[in-house]
Amino acid sequence: MQKNILISSIFTCIMFYNSFSQESKARLNHTAIYVMDVKASAAFYQSIIGLDSIPEPFHDGKHAWFRTSPGIALHIIQGAEKKKEYYKNQHTCFSVASIEKFIAVLKQHNLTWEDRDGVKMALTTRIDGIKQLWLQDPDAYWIEINDAKD
């Protein structure tokens, strides 16, 4: 009987700990970028990257919000005075079903891209077979596009 009570108590403690530790973990809610022209950036992320807009609470013409995945958003905020130079290694990555179809969209809009090493109009194939390219948005933020499946 005491053995059953001990096992039950241990099980209850483990379940409580697991529940508490899962609830206390942080999760990504959104990323934000500060831009010169919110309309140009919103058009880019909607028509080129293919993101769906979501309601934003400000309704002031200085914000645009987009869904990047379930429960995660991109917030675009107008107010930057000039473009900045960003490192390619600090980028946002989006996965697409077909990198070739994505390149067709880029070509249709006369946009350039490059591979990891900066070779224009080229792709990088990672060691795991994932194809990737990089481009910059209207404010020069780096974006990686790849064909990862998960």
Image (cartoon, helix red, strand yellow):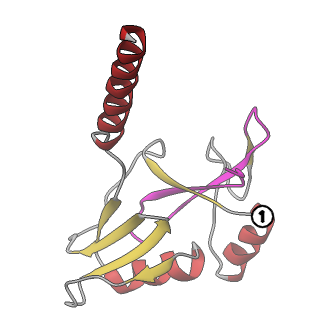
Task: Place residue 83 in its image quadrant.
Answer: bottom left
Is residue 137 visible to the viewer in this orientation of the structure?
Answer: no
* Labels in figure, total: 1
Horizontal side, residue 96 vs residue 57: left or right: right
Name the residue nearer the viewer: 107 or 61. Answer: 61
Horizontal side, residue 100 vs residue 112: left or right: right
Task: Find residue 22 and report its horizontal and vertical position in percent.
Answer: 36, 39
Residue 56, placed above or below residue 14: below
Task: Place residue 14 in its image quadrant.
Answer: top left
Name the residue nearer the viewer: 149 or 46. Answer: 149
Residue that numbered label 1 is attached to: 98
- The residue drawn where x is 47% and y is 41% is 89
Horizontal side, residue 20 vs residue 139: left or right: left
- The residue drawn where x is 46% and y is 50% is 91
Residue bounds of the magenta highlight = 126-150
Residue 84, placed above or below residue 60: above
Task: Find residue 50 and report its horizontal and vertical position in percent.
Answer: 58, 76
Q: Amino acid at mark 1?
A: Ser
Task: Place residue 60 in its image quadrant.
Answer: bottom left
Name the residue nearer the viewer: 150 or 61. Answer: 150
- The residue drawn where x is 78% and y is 71% is 101
The quadrant the N terminus occupies is top left
- The residue most toward the top is 3
